Image (cartoon, rainbow, N blue to C red):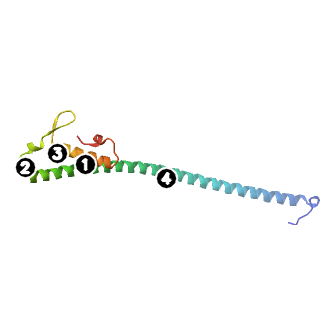
Amino acid sequence: MQHHPAALLDVSDLRELGDRIDDAVQEAATRMGQVRAALAEQTRRAEAMEQRAAELERQLAVAEARLAVEQMHSAGLAAQASHLMAVALETELTTITALMEETDAEGRPTTRLAAIYDAAFDVKAAELGIDDPARFRAE
């Protein structure tokens, strides 16, 4: 197409220019639709990944809490075992009654081993930053 002064443009040149403009607009609209579709898919994927990440964070928190309880339980059992070994070595333990010397918070008789376990459990809970370890203790 040659450039002509506006007064010299004929109708066929104007139609051709109009067709080219229409084609360019149509192509741009098609590309915009493709970009919107790609953006929508990326947004959907990002939201799905955010939901999965939140679920994994929740599962991790639960696993960490369970681990803390097991660590406290382990500390309590280790303290009991150490105490039993010490008592056995010191007194050549022949009776369990030597370990029955405590009462619990409600005044019920309990064993010295239970008190040792609870104390070690509570110490480990404090190390782990747990404020109320009694709620995790198996009764």
Q: Earlier in the sequence, mark 2 or mark 3?
A: 2
Residue at 13 percent across and 40 percent down: it is 101
* Residue receiving disc 2: 93
Secondary element under disc 3, as helix, strand or loop, is helix
* Residue 13 higher or lower than 117, as above or below: below
* Residue receiving disc 1: 73
Secondary element under disc 2, as helix, strand or loop, is loop
Q: Where does the C terminus fall, quadrant-wise? A: top left
Q: Nearer the viewer, mark 3 or mark 4?
A: 3
Residue type at the position of mark 4? Met
* Residue 113 higher or lower than 39, as above or below: above
Residue type at the position of mark 3? Leu
Residue type at the position of mark 2? Leu
* Residue receiving disc 4: 49
In the image, taking residue 134 as reference, residue 18 lies left or right, namely right
Q: Earlier in the sequence, mark 1 or mark 3?
A: 1
Q: CA distance from mark 1 to mark 2?
A: 25 Å
Answer with the quarter of the image where residue 42 lies. Answer: bottom right
Residue 110 coordinates in the image, percent (x, y): 16, 39
Residue 6 coordinates in the image, percent (x, y): 92, 59
* Residue receiving disc 3: 113
Answer with the quarter of the image where residue 118 lies. Answer: top left
Q: Where does the N terminus fall, quadrant-wise? A: bottom right
Q: Earlier in the sequence, mark 2 or mark 4?
A: 4
Q: CA distance from mark 2 to mark 3?
A: 14 Å
Q: Earlier in the sequence, mark 1 or mark 2?
A: 1
Q: CA distance from mark 2 to mark 4?
A: 60 Å
